[in-house]
């Protein structure tokens, strides 16, 4: 029996004009990963960077609604390239633009790989300082496909404070390490609750998951995002928090995350807005 030589993997390369790709991932859904990805992109764009945002969560593509462009349809250029939709200074591409409302995506790995390749290679991203990729939750086919297609500059991991989330977030961190993707840091979302009436804070959840992950993997805790009803309402209204409530405590924390990421990329910030 002859042993078959393993097929050579195609060399990874960045999409044309894109300098860096940063993935935003989470071990489980419902932790606010997409909220962090959207506001990360918008905050960096407000600081003068050229930013793209890829909604790679094909099973739950919520970014068009969160960016207020759910009724837009990307157009095709004469050369066959897809033109991304622009919103809040960010170039956006999502499966949500291509589906009928409430239509599910029921795809196996090869189809997902093809879709990710098309979104990365066949979209006219233009000259970008950074492309932010909002990954699906967990450690599945989409994450693996993207890591095989393009070199990721780094990744952020989003978690909630509860220690019960620790197992899931550790799996996400281990995945990035196995894929040789540098982990820029962890973002703890839904921290202390800010009362919308009196603006006092109180602790709703137990704490510990983000700190434990940070210590185990030797990565910084980039931000502690308070639990504020304004975060949810901003996303539902299509106005990211950093646009709708730029001086709120969560927006300030998210801008801090964005500037920490820009510093890791060594991308100069052209202008600063707010604190």
Image (tube, rainbow, N blue to C red):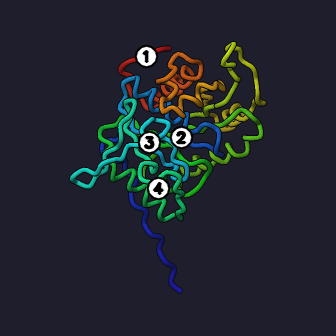
Disc 4 secondary structure class: helix
Give the spatial CA distance, label 3 vs label 2: 21 Å
Count of numbered tags: 4
Q: Residues within 10 Å of mark 4 (few under 14, many from 20)?
A: some
The reply to whether residue 50 is visible in this rendering is: yes
Q: Which of marks 2 and 1 is nearer the N terminus?
A: 2
Q: Is mark 2 on a helix, strand or loop?
A: strand
Q: The residue tagged with tag 3: helix, strand or loop? A: loop
Q: Distance between the residues labelled 3 and 4?
A: 29 Å
In the rendered view, would you say 134 is above or below 117?
above
- Front position among marks 2 and 1: 1
Q: Name the residue under label 1.
A: 273
Give coordinates of residue 206: x percent, y percent.
78, 30
> Which of the two labelled residues, at mark 4 and mark 2, occupies the earlier sequence position?
2
For disc 2, the marked residue is 24
The answer to whether 233 is drawn above or below residue 177 in the figure is above
Mark 4 or mark 1, which is nearer the start of the sequence? 4
């Amino acid at each position: 029996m002859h042993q078959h030589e393993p097929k050579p993997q195609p060399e990874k390369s960045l999409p044309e004009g894109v300098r860096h790709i940063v993935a935003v991932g989470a071990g489980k859904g419902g932790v606010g990963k997409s909220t962090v990805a959207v506001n990360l992109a918008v905050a960096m764009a407000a600081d003068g960077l050229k930013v793209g945002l890829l909604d790679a969560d094909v099973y739950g593509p919520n970014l068009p609604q969160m960016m207020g462009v759910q009724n837009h349809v990307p157009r095709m250029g004469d050369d066959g390239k897809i033109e991304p939709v622009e919103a809040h200074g960010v170039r956006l591409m999502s499966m949500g633009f291509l589906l009928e409302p409430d239509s599910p995506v029921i795809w196996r790995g090869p189809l997902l790989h093809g879709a990710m390749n098309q979104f990365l290679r066949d979209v006219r991203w233009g000259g970008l300082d950074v492309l932010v990729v909002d990954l699906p939750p967990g450690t599945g086919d989409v994450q693996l496909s993207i890591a095989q297609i393009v070199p990721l500059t780094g990744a952020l991991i989003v978690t909630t404070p509860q220690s019960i989330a620790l197992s899931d977030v550790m799996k996400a961190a281990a995945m990035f390490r196995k894929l040789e993707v540098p982990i820029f840091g962890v973002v703890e979302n839904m921290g202390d609750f800010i009362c919308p009436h009196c603006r006092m804070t109180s602790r709703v959840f137990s704490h510990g998951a983000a700190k434990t992950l940070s210590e185990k993997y030797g990565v910084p805790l980039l931000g502690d995002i308070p639990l504020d009803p304004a975060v949810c309402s901003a996303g539902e209204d299509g106005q990211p928090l950093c646009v709708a409530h730029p001086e709120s405590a969560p927006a300030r924390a998210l801008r801090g995350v964005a500037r920490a990421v820009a510093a890791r990329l060594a991308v100069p910030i052209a202008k600063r807005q707010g604190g």
